[in-house]
Image (cartoon, rainbow, N blue to C red):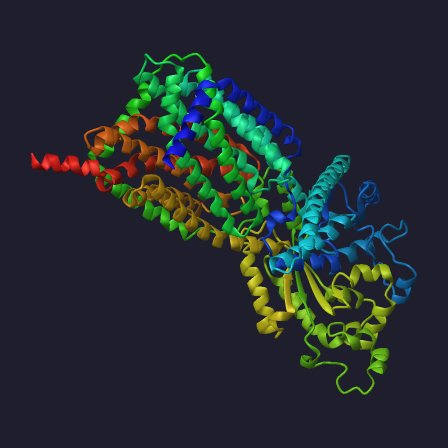
Amino acid sequence: MKTFFGKVSAGYLHLILGQPVAVLVTSALIVGACAFYVPDFQLDASSDALVLENDAALRLYQETRDRYGTDDSLIVTYSPRAELFAPPVLGQLRGLRDDLRAIPRVETVTSILDVPLIASPPVTLADLRKHLPTLDNPKQDLALARRELLSSPLYENLLISEDGQTTALAVTFEPDTRFRLLQRERDALRGKERVGQASSADLGRLEAVSAAFELQKQQNQRDMADDIAHVRAVLDGHRATAQVHLGGVPMIVADSIAFIGSDLVVFGTGVLCFLVLLLSLAFRAVRWVCLPLATCAAVAVVMMGFLGWAEWPITVVSSNFLSVLLIITLSLTIHLIVAYQEVQEATPEGDAQAWVRQMIRSKIRPCAYTAATTAVAFGSLVVSGIRPVIDFGWMMVVGVAVAFFFAFTLFPAACVLLAPPQRRRGWFLRRVTASVAERIHRRPHRVLRGFAATTIVLAGGLFFLSVENRFIDYFHESTAIHQGMLRIDQQLGGTTPLEILIDPPPIEDDPMDPLEGEEDEDDWDLDAGIAGSSHWFRSAQMGQQARIHAFLDDRPETGKVLSLWTSLAMLESIEPGLTSDDIALSILYKKLPVDLSATLVEPYFNEEADQLRFAIRVFESDASLNRSRLLEDIQSHLVEVEGIAPGRIHQTGMVVLYNNLLQSLFRTQILTVGVVFFLVAVMFLFAFRSLRLAAIAIVPNVFAGGSILGIMGWFGIPLDLMTITIAAISIGIGVDDTIHYVHRWREEVERGNGDPWAAIARSHATVGRAMIYTTVTIALGFSILMLSNFVPTAYFGALTGLAMLTALVADLSLLPVLMASFGRLPAERGAAARVTNR
């Protein structure tokens, strides 16, 4: 085996040193081939990024949308500068509505102009069957219409604010039928595969359907982005006469991806410029600026091309994977630069080939261990159960391998071809590292006590770590999306949809079964109509519906609540006693005009399933919003107070999907961090061949990873789709420094007299410099991300820099003290014994 690896190593060195041009040409060909697929690189803005793998709640959500219609509507808020119900203003509102309807894919636009009015003046059901009065009628009494809209349980705080100065337009788009059909077929085939019942034909079909679904999903996203752009263009034409804002779930998703895409370009350019400046200041040589950045560029292009070729889109979670790869690649190349400078300084009479050979020999092993351990750390994310997090883990595993490949091919080959650089001594940094080594040598116990105290303080923050966060907090207050969501919350009944579905009890358990005791069921159905066949659509159940509605409406987290009771209570104003008369209810259900039934009944009651639906809008701007507690309280009330069996109650909507994700994030963080530490410890054991050193090396990484989570807890930064990866990133970064330091320390111990502190001083002066260069350069470079209007990106920049600084401090102070105190090698023990004998 050693002979085999020896031959591989010799062949590799011969290729790099003897054929550097061929290596560079091959690298350029690989990059060029991958660049061809970069245009296929995609951002995924679908709801898959907000749900769990195999989440049953997602299936319920999709079934509910099929049954009752989609909640994916855009909400336009319109606050005119004049009185809303003035005829000129209504004309302007009508113009806005018509402009929105003219957008190609818009299916409906619902406004106060279009909804039926039943009390302006009062009409009968017979009148409604002939004609549906609306505000769009120029003969409509505006004063009566205003009074009805402001007092209607259906329209108030939904289409019009309490003060009557802001109205809403709900814009829905034509459903993508092909997308839904492909999604259903894909999910059905996945279900068969999951339980082991898929045939080879099913698996082949699954592959084809999945590919078609991904293509259709990308088209769907492009269409939605275009639609939102068209809507915004229309709104821009009406801002002169009114304050106009846009909101709704589709806009939140689309704008999140737009912010991420913008950040990739704007801040990517900013980070690049900052890194050029910092590398220039650190190494003061053009080659040491251009070569690391060229290596990073090659890694980025290859990974983007690979993901485009594989049709593997990135999501909100994995959108920063290029930034993380940049960190890893820069770290590898900076360690190589410092090693090259050390070799050049030690053997000034040598040439570029000799220096590169020695550079590779001294760094390829620790860098290989570093890359492997970092890949293992990110690979542990696959246990999360969250598809975007899993994808991020696998992307990083592939990316780390690509970074290692180019760091040890493109970089050294270029170094061989370039003329030897002028030797420069970093005296200032040498003095810094020497001072650190001296201080920890003189006060090792103070270092241990300091880290112990810091650990206790930061551990306290873990108890405050939360997963509760709000979509609105993802955007700064100055952004249009934040302002739109706030306006909808404050004046139009909430932003995020929640739905409560209640099934009827089994017939044998229904104490009010209308068929019980009847000799002729057909006669009963004929006489009683819907009230005779339905558990919910009858007078005996109206009291319970009213109580449930009132309970949901009284919750501080909920805004507008709509239900069958809302519609019937409104209709009772023109048909007194309606909700207490089964015959009247049956006549109403049978005779209600189709258009009116589609608005008042069908969204809240399904006759086929005899299912009741409560549609709720939750205040996204509520600072005390706790989705989990809200859902638990609703479930508890329905079971314990209303006596409804748990199996009959179904909660769905974006609130439920996102809450499931948030709760999983907390469990996942514990699981993934535990798996990461275990696998890293195993890798340390493999790399160092010493249980003692492996145990010591894991300590600063536990400190770095735990510190970031503790700081997040103390500062109230919640876990979300972006911050869940910070712990893995901090551990990956800490592992990098730890392996390089321990590897160098062991070399210094073996070539010295066994004095651990002398080895620490020399390690600080050599590899310590590379660690500082890497950390300071990348931490400062990524600090520019804190200027982003997308708060998760700003958190990523701040926490990544903090993670690197924490890992650096631990590896240059805590790690050396632990190794000097507890990590003695056999050579050290032998030297100590000789001293004792003398």
Q: Nearer the viewer, residue 725 or 305?
A: 305
Could you tell me residue 427's position as x and y percent? 31, 19
Q: Is residue 472 above or below residue 282?
A: below
- Let me know if residue 755 appears in the view: yes
Q: Nearer the viewer, residue 363 or 7?
A: 7
472 displayed left or right of 229: left
Q: From the image, which quarter does the C terminus lie in?
A: top left
Q: Nearer the viewer, residue 15 or 198?
A: 15
Q: From the image, which quarter does the N terminus lie in?
A: top left
Quarter holding residue 650: bottom right
- Let me know if residue 121 appears in the view: no
709 displayed left or right of 759: right
Q: So how many labels did they put on this image?
A: 0
Residue at left offset 70%, top offset 73%: 504
Residue at left offset 77%, top offset 37%: 234
Could you tell me residue 206's position as x and y percent? 68, 51
Quarter holding residue 570: bottom right
Quarter holding residue 535: bottom right
Residue farthest along the left direction in this orientation: 838
Q: Is residue 576 above or below residue 410?
A: below
Could you tell me residue 330's position as x and y percent? 46, 28
Residue at left offset 55%, top offset 63%: 632
Could you tell me residue 210's position as x and y percent? 68, 48
Q: Is residue 577 above or below residue 667?
A: below
301 displayed left or right of 98: left
Residue farthest along the right direction in this orientation: 130
691 displayed left or right of 676: left
